[in-house]
Structures are given as structure tokens and as C-alpha cells.
Image (cartoon, rainbow, N blue to C red):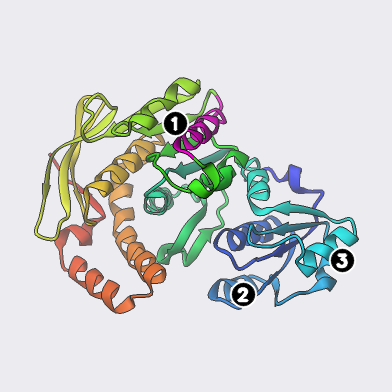
Amino acid sequence: MPNIDILTKYKNIHMIGIGGVSMSGIAAILKNFGFHVTGSDANDSDSIKLLKDKGIKVTVGHNLEDISKADVVVYSAAIKQDDPEMLEAKKLNIETIERADFLGILTRCFKDTICISGTHGKTTTTSMVSLCFIEALKDPSIQVGAFLKAINGNYKVGNSEHFIIEACEYVESFLKFSPKAEIILNIDNDHLDYFKNFENIKNAFIKYVKLLPPEGLLIVNGDDVNCLELPKYTNAKCLSYGITNKKTDFFAVNITFDDCGFPEFDVYSHNEFFDRIKLNVPGMHNVLNALACIALCTEYGIEKSAIKSALWVFITALYFVISFTTMAWHISWVIFLIGAALESIIKAVFELKAN
């Protein structure tokens, strides 16, 4: 079980913007830890209904009464300092903590926080890793940036030391975390409204890598020249993966695509044949995402059979990710039906074939 000693001074926690993707997950985890949690949000939503089902009091609109009973107020980045509840907290000298800072505190409660980061592919890879850990009965707590059918939401409250989170680099929020393992998928120009230039983005990832303890684990994309520079900034164990770079620890060769654009390829681990892999999601980028997942899960001792089973769940989860993101249910359902008709999807997002 996680060690919550650093949070015990906060018996009553109020959360402004509690219906957000990350905030709702934090609220559920805190409730599971035994804290009294209340919250407010400007709009009603399915995530708020789920929180209410867990016994969390949520007000749509403002509730100054709950502020007066709180030991700390956690607020999302969207909440302005002149918000009525924020003003009430300041008036009563109640401590306020921004969401990313509080999530950082929460990561320190777990001995094994696994952070998946990068400019692109975070949600997909976090989902794949999460479902593999669930199938391997590791019972992780999870925070991911999309609704996953397998966990009936965007979070899961586990009872182990594993905490798997999607770690965003925007405003350097991932520097608030305490990771034991990191996957860095890629580094690209993004969020220039904050970073201003690419050099600042790279420096943020360098600082992020330096957070790893010596007994930690860093997994980087060896096809991304900017990622390849990162291992020199940590004493943690480092693994790499790639497609074009065959000097990586995990790499793919003999890549072919079927009529649906789904790739099949040979994976090599430390220059030894690992297995022939078939993905049930299209695109070369998902070959890289799968390699990152394989590298991490292999390091954590997850069996191939668990990975195979998990990825059948992942294709269902992917349908919900597409649907909730685009709201194009009619299109995504057709895609899912077509995919479900294929033998490869019945078996897993990637099928590990026998030699």
C-alpha cells in the first residue's frame, strides 16, 4: 500500500474543478485513502456522477461552506485567483495548492510511480502499459488522459505501490512528480506559448530525467535524436527502442502492413529475437509506442501471455478514446467493428506469435 504520511495533515480536502480529467482521478484516490473529499465544478458531467457514486460531495457551482471546513484547497489550472472559492480560502488563511503540485505530492506516496511523457503518443502508450499491468495482476493506480472502458473511466484506484500516470510537459508540470520509471516517447516543438523555443523544451526534459533515482528506469525513443541525449543526465538504468536505429535495446525489423494498415514486425531485444508482433492499430508511430510498452513491461517481468490478453482490452479502450475525443461515435463504431472482425484483434493489440 502507498505511504500517505505526507498527506495526513490534510484531513479534509476541497477540490475546485473536481470534474477535470486529472482532478477527478486525484479525488477518487484520496477518497480511497480515507480522506474526506469535497469539490465543486462549473458544469455537471459523467465524471462528477462517478465521484458522487463513490460518496464524494460535489457541488455544481460555488460552495463557500465546504471551503470553510477544508484543511487544504486543491484547484485546477483553469481556476483563476479571483474565483469566489479561492478568495474565500485566502480570506480564511486556508492553504491552496495547484493540481500539478498536489499530484506531485501524491506521486511521492507511491514507491513506484511510472510516468509516460513525450510530445505525442502519451495517452495511447499510458493506456497500453496500464492494461498490461492490470492483466499481470499488479493492481496499479492509474491516471490517463482519456476514458478507458476497461477501468470505466480515466483513472483507477489500485492497492499496490505502482502508480501509472500520463506526464505532460506543458508549463513543466511533470517536474513536480517523483518518478521511479519514465518513458519518453519523443520531443518535438509544442506548447511554444509557454516554452518560447525548442531549446527550452529540451531543457525541461533534461530536468525531468534528472528526477529519476539511481535505482530508477529510463526508456527513450532511439529514433529521436533529442531523446538519445537524455541518458547522460541520469544514473538510472537506461533502455532505448527504435525502428531506424538498430543500436537500440529493442528494435523492430521486417515491418509489413496488411490491407487495413495494421503493421506486423519482428522485435529484437538486446540483439536477440524476441518475437514476431502484429498490431491491431494502424501506423508506424504505434510500432514505436508498442516497443516502448514492451521494453517497460519486459523490465517489470510481465509475461507475454499477460500482454496478449491486455491488448484485446486495449482495442476496446481505443474505441472509447476515439469516441470521447471526437464524439464521432458512428464512425469509431464502424472502425471497431471492422477491426473486431480480424483474427489479430481477437487475440490482442499486438499478437505474440509462437516461433
Q: Judging from the image, what secondary structure is the residue with disc 1 in?
A: strand
**Spatial CA span between label 3 and label 2:** 24 Å
Q: In the rendered structure, find residue 258 and report the number of the disc placed on it.
A: none
Q: Which mark is residue 53?
A: 2
Within 10 Å of disc 1 (Cα), the crowding (few <14, some 14-19, many 20+) is many
Determine which of the numbered discs, if any, sits on residue 68 in the image. Answer: 3
Image quadrant in which you'd find residue 177:
top right
Q: Are marks 3 and 1 in contact (CB under 8 Å)?
A: no
Name the residue type under label 2: Asp
Amino acid type assigned to the residue bearing label 1 in the image: Leu
Comparing marks 2 and 1, which lies closer to the viewer? Answer: 1
Q: Is residue 282 magenta?
A: no
Q: Quadrant of residue 48?
A: bottom right
Q: Disc 2 vs disc 1: Cβ atoms closer than 8 Å?
A: no
> From what the image shows, is residue 5 above or below residue 274?
below
Mark earlier in primary sequence (2, 1): 2
**Spatial CA span between label 2 and label 1:** 38 Å
Q: Which residues are magenta?
A: 197-213
Circle 2: is it few (<14), some (14-19), or many (20+) Cα within 10 Å?
few
Q: Which residue is mark 1?
A: 218
Residue 156 image position (x, y, % from top left): 52, 58
Q: Is residue 166 visible?
A: no
Q: Nearer the viewer, residue 80 or 101?
A: 80
Query: Helix or strand or loop: what does disc 2 sit on?
Result: helix
Instruction: Work out whether mark 3 precedes mark 2 in sequence or the reverse, and give the earlier one.
Output: 2
Question: Which amino acid lies under the numbered mark 3 shown in the image of this protein?
Answer: Ser
Q: Is residue 138 above or below residue 243?
A: below
